[in-house]
Image (tube, rainbow, N blue to C red):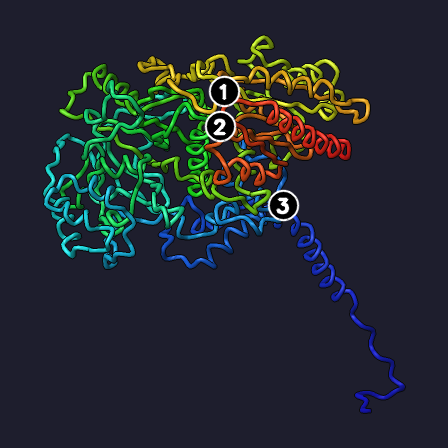
Amino acid sequence: MYLTQPLSVKPAPARIGSYNKRYKRLLVLAAVILCMSPWALLIFSFMPRDASLVGGSDTDWMNVDKLTFKAAVQSEIRHISSTTPTPTNDTRSPREHILLALASHTESDTCDYYMNAQFLEDPVAQPHRLCSSDKLVQDPLKPSAIHMDAFDMKRRLSFYPQKLEWARGFKTGLVNEELQPWMKDYLKSRERVSLVLDSDPVVPPSVGSDGPGPDDNVWKEAGEISWSLRKDSIQSGTSLLRCGILDTNIPQRYCDSRNVAMKLNMVPPVTNWPGLDLRPPFGVLEASCHLSENEWFGRGFGDGAAGWMFDGMEIVPPQESATIECDAWIDTTLFFISRWDTTNPYQFHQDAMNTFLVYSLLQLHPSKVQPVILDSRNSDGPYTAAWSHIFSSSRHLVDVRQIRDTITDALKQNANPLNASPVVCFKRAVWGIHGGISPLSRGGTKKTKCENAPLLFAFRDFMLERIWDAAGVVRGEKGTGGAVEAWRTLPVASLEKEDNAGYVFEEEVRRLEREQGREQARNFAYETVVVTYAVRNMSTSRSMNEKGILGSTVVHGVAGTKQRGFSQDGRVDRLKRIIPNEAALIQSLKELADSYDVQETGIKIHFRAVDFAALAFEDQVAIAQGTDFYIGPHGAAFVHLLYLRQLPFAAVLELKPPERGAGNQQFQNLALKMGNQYDYVSTGSSIDREQMSKISSAATRLLDTLTTARNAIK
């Protein structure tokens, strides 16, 4: 060991003071970091996800690999599952409901692509550009890329008779190499109405923006619909069309468009022709962008709003001097819907489901969207208020003809010289999918293995939460997806006790909560099993019911002044599967409920028979939500299985007529996917004594199962 100084010399004392000052600074810095870390993590957790990996952006999803996109969605699921149940907005968006359902329903290995909501993780389902400011690379046209059948092609090619022979041979896979050139020629040679107005062109929107529009305009406010009379033009090449496909086997697309125009005098009028569809003339819509012809013509658009857009859209090739002149702008995001069947609850829910899917993929929230009806509204049906209250917060029920009339009248009142065709331009317009191809209609020919499907729970929670919000009802402290607690009931406005309902359970629960408190109401709800029989009645009007909470608050038209000029009666001339001796069946079921042993189970059974078609839509949902045991003949009202009260599950007894045998499992599958108990009894056109006995036995078994499960959770 070497020493630097003799041992007899004492070492100099260490300078501790200077070191202490340094350590103190480090300690203070460490303390600040520790204190700030939780806040930084909290702020980061609530930051929005990367905008390049969400459905609301303008990203071309065909160029995003599936693993990257799936990882982004999984990150969203983890993020939303860790947040408070209280929504950021008044209600959660469809996408948020799906993410919550995916986070809470993990046992779904037996469910398919749709029921597991895997489309949310699939780049193919996201919208990708078909027409934009950029020249898109054209893929070679291949037979495998075309999915339209011969009938659809004939309809699309009807303007070009000499090409019909090509359409007739389409199913055989014969592809004419002239297809792409002659379609290009058709687009270029199609005569278009030239609009010449003095106006300043609008600056092209940047990526991710909502479109053009100066900030200093004087706005006219009509509820939540923002529109203005201003002659800003759509500059050449600044339109954007993006479309996505949910199912490549049935490639009917939804589309998201920016900066497109509608010629108001070409909007199809309502005629005396029965039915809903009003096909548009070519040229009623106009866009200026570089079109991918193979993508545009190579896949089907279907018969929904996207098909309406395809039939009516004229694509103007971008030119330096070409602009689309506008007389008015609508700045609110519009969602165009061409409904399938307005009087049928099952078909309405198919339209609603597909709308829910499109909202989730494009990250739309009802508070910022206005649905616009494209069909004839003949008749409107009891479900129409859903488009003004559930998929919008505006409470405005608007059709495309009311937009035409409102803007045309405003132009006249402002002494504006009307063109031959006044033009309204849309900042953003979304075009929905035909309801008939919704996930509700899939796989109905065989029994499903899927239980507790995330998509259905997300859809149910969204619908319930929106109805609760529209009705002004305070949500419960806890509940699936931030919605209401299962025992709490919606108000019922369009149903009276004398309407053969027997017992309005929902109003009794609400009365108890008001008068005796929450605990008393909850106990009563848990100690009651409500059996609801669904009546089928041909004489029901099936019209829009304005006794309900939603229907009574609808504002008709853009400015709330346009009256409905269409048929309201949706009465059917013929209704199948009506049971001639239904009164005897109802009496038998009522006696069974009244005689059920309440002493042994401690559960009171209440029975009621309800004609759902006679009620407002929101009251149909309220009655279903207050039902523990649903019984009825096979029919569209079975779609209300979506809303049944689950304490911890509901029971379903379907009466199947001969024409709905083993090959029809759609309502059994719906019951199982919602985690409910199901049974059925085969019947004839009338219920004989033997079938009545089978119905009673099946009902008793299901009641036993329900009461046992209820007692276990009380």
Residue topped by disc 2:
635
The mark nearer the N terminus, 2 or 1, is 1
Alpha-carbon span between mark 2 and mark 1: 8 Å
Q: Nearer the viewer, mark 3 or mark 2?
A: 2
Badge 1 marks a residue whose secondary structure is: loop
As shown in the figure, which amino acid type bears the numbered disc 3?
Ser
Q: Is residue 450 left or right of residue 180?
A: right
Residue 322 or residue 440, whichever sits in front: 440
- Above or below residue 479? Residue 265 is above
Q: Are marks 3 and 2 in contact (CB under 8 Å)?
A: no
Task: Count residues near mark 3 (Cα–Cα under 10 Å), then give few for <14, some for 14-19, many for 20+.
Answer: few
Q: Nearer the viewer, mark 3 or mark 1?
A: 1
Task: Count residues near mark 1 (Cα–Cα under 10 Å), then give few for <14, some for 14-19, many for 20+.
Answer: many
- Residue 511, by quadrant, is top right
Alpha-carbon span between mark 3 and mark 1: 45 Å
Badge 3 marks a residue whose secondary structure is: loop
Q: Which mark is residue 536?
A: 1
* Residue at x 69%, y 24% (from the top left corner): 529
As shown in the figure, which amino acid type bears the numbered disc 1?
Arg
Alpha-carbon span between mark 3 and mark 2: 40 Å
Q: Are marks 2 and 1 in contact (CB under 8 Å)?
A: yes
Residue 146 or residue 117, whichever sits in front: 146
